[in-house]
Image: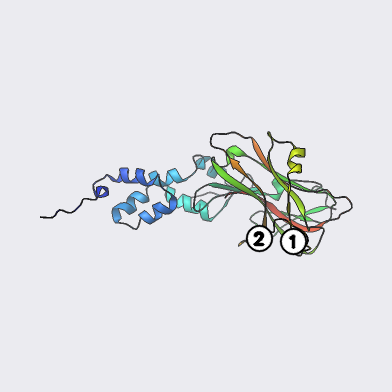
Amino acid sequence: MTTKSLNPFTILPEGCISEIISFTTPADAARSSAISKGFKSAAESDVVWDKFLPSDHQDIVSTSVSVVVTDCKKDLYFRLSHSPILLREGRLSFWLDKTSGKKCYLLSARRLVISFSDIQLFWEWISDTDSRFPEVAFLNTVDLLDIRGKIGTRALSLGTKYAAYLVFKISERYHGLESTNAMVRFVNQESEDEAEKRATTVILAARAPRHLKGKLPEKRTDGWLEVEIGNFYNGEGDDNGDVEAWLLDSRPFHAKCGLIIEGLEFCPI
């Protein structure tokens, strides 16, 4: 006489199954839904998807410039991972990494510190149909290119390695954008001089001379370019204060024009 092995998951209460699935990943939970009707109900429960959402997601969503309406936590997760929302008067964009659920931010050009951006002779504020923000910054002409953006490390996901990117375009007529120094630093732990000493080079211009070495921009699916400024690790339980991404080209008598800035992005890698 043979006996069939009993699958323990068939006798567990749905709540227990949900609790187990919540210790996996969003991708695992989505796959679990296809196993059976019982698993589908457990895998789609709020118990599971609340664990995948950031612990402060309610506070974040409450500052959205538009109302975010979803039926359940799973819908909210997919809403935030597929459609960024605008926060803080439309000057900050937030979304979740689709795979990990880690927090991502794009600081609009209006939230950045850009030297001479308040003088129309040097910079203009224009609209761009590809941008999620009302305005982007257009460089008319400057010698000093100094662009900085800061975000509190507590706003980011803990225990996560992040990269900072400049999100930009180059106009048809540009000059002086071949190379720029790029740095990322914890403001409370490293001085500007120390950061400058270990700066890397990024190339912004599409037709930079071959002899120049540095990180090259990549095309995005949203119509913009991005170039990595640097990366950092946001420690588990650490409070590192603000992290700053910084682009600097202070070469004298080296005019620059034709740069269009959407913002600075902080995403997990």
What label does residue 170 carry, if any? 1
What label does residue 179 carry, if any? none
Residue at the left extreme? 1
- Name the spot of residue 222 as percent of width and height, x first: 62, 61
What label does residue 218 carry, if any? 2
Q: Secondary structure at mark 2?
A: strand
- Name the spot of residue 221 as percent of width and height, x first: 60, 62
Q: Secondary structure at mark 1?
A: strand
Q: Nearer the viewer, residue 214 or 87?
A: 214
- Name the spot of residue 178 as percent of width and height, x first: 78, 58
**Residue 242 seen:** yes
Mark 2 vs mark 1, foreground winner is 2
Mark 2 vs 1, N-terminal side:
1
**Residue 135 seen:** no
Q: Is residue 44 left or right of residue 62?
A: left
Q: Which residue is pictured at 63% across the width and 55% down the height? A: 132
In this view, 79 is above or below 54: below
In which quadrant is the N terminus drawn? bottom left
Q: Are marks 2 and 1 in contact (CB under 8 Å)?
A: no
Q: Which residue is pictured at 58% across the width and 40% down the height? A: 234
Q: Mark 2 Cα within 10 Å, few/some/many (few <14, many 20+)?
A: few
Q: Is residue 93 left or right of residue 109?
A: left
Q: CA distance from mark 2 to mark 1?
A: 12 Å
Q: Amino acid at mark 1?
A: Ile
Q: Which residue is pictured at 55% across the width and 43% down the height? A: 160
Q: Amino acid at mark 2?
A: Glu
Q: Is residue 236 left or right of residue 174?
A: left
- Name the spot of residue 181 as percent of width and height, x first: 76, 49
